[in-house]
Amino acid sequence: MPCIEPARLADAEAIHQLITYWAEKGDMLHRPVGEIYEAIRDFKVARIDGEIVGCGSLHIMGADLAEVRSLAVSEAAQGKRVGAAIVAACVQDAMSLGLDRVFALTYRPGFFEKQGFRLANVMEFPQKVWNECVRCPFFTNCKEVAVVRSLREEGDLSVPLVR
């Protein structure tokens, strides 16, 4: 099982390389390295034997909502529950902050459904659509699927799903 921990500034380049690898394959959106530095406190990294094999971030969107974004796992660590562990850590952070819901926009909704998310309409998240999506080059032809997980129903003592 990987060690999941908060990202450090020294991890920004490795996070950027991981995201860029999958973005160039068309599996996620690119993130400039400067944006990763700015949001480094939002990121979690997964390490196996000291090497970063996964990353993801929890981006606060408002008083009751956050987004899991930039979730990426190296090819070598696929199938080792790294992504599930990162999502669980992000959900745990969201719960500790008292948020009601966590959502993601993804090309892999089935993965998130296994983590307790349900399919959603992106318009349930107008903060995301009108502040960020509208600036995306794929705005008029977006293929990402919205998923959401309600945290209120789970209660503050709930343990996030990890499968």
Image (cartoon, rainbow, N blue to C red):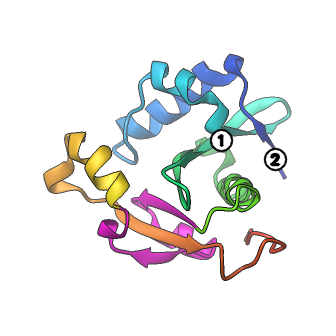
Residue at 39% across, 75% down: 120
Task: Identify whether 11 is placed above or below 47.
Answer: above
Residue topped by disc 1: 54
Q: Give me the disc on residue 2.
A: 2
The single residue placed furthest to the bottom in the displayed view is: 153
- Residue 58 lies in the magenta-colored region: no
Magenta segment includes 109: yes
Above or below: residue 37 compared with residue 104: above
**Point 71% across, 38% down: residue:** 45
| Residue type at numbered disc 1 | Gly
For residue 98, side relative to residue 121 (left or right):
right
Above or below residue 163? Residue 127 is: above
Q: Is residue 17 above or below residue 134?
A: above
Say left or right for 8 vs 43. Answer: right
Q: Position of residue 55 (x, y in %)?
A: 63, 40
Q: Amino acid at mark 2?
A: Pro
Q: CA distance from mark 2 to mark 1?
A: 9 Å
Residue 102 badge: none
Q: Position of residue 3 (x, y in %)?
A: 84, 43
**Residue 130 visible, this orientation:** yes
The picture places residue 150, in percent across and down from the top left corner, at 59, 75
- As helix, strand or loop, the secondary structure at mark 1 comes to strand
**Lower sequence index among marks 2 and 1:** 2
- Do labels 2 and 1 touch, CB within 8 Å? yes
Residue closer to the observer: 3 or 6: 6
Taking depth in this image into account, of 77 and 99 the one nearest to the observer is 99
* Residue 80 showing in the rendered view: no
Q: Which residues are magenta?
A: 101-125
Task: Judge left or right: residue 89 versus residue 72.
Answer: right
Q: Badge 1 local density, few (<14 within 10 Å), some, or many (20+)?
A: many
What residue lies at 19% left-to-right and 50% top-to-bottom?
139
Q: Extreme front residue here?
A: 63
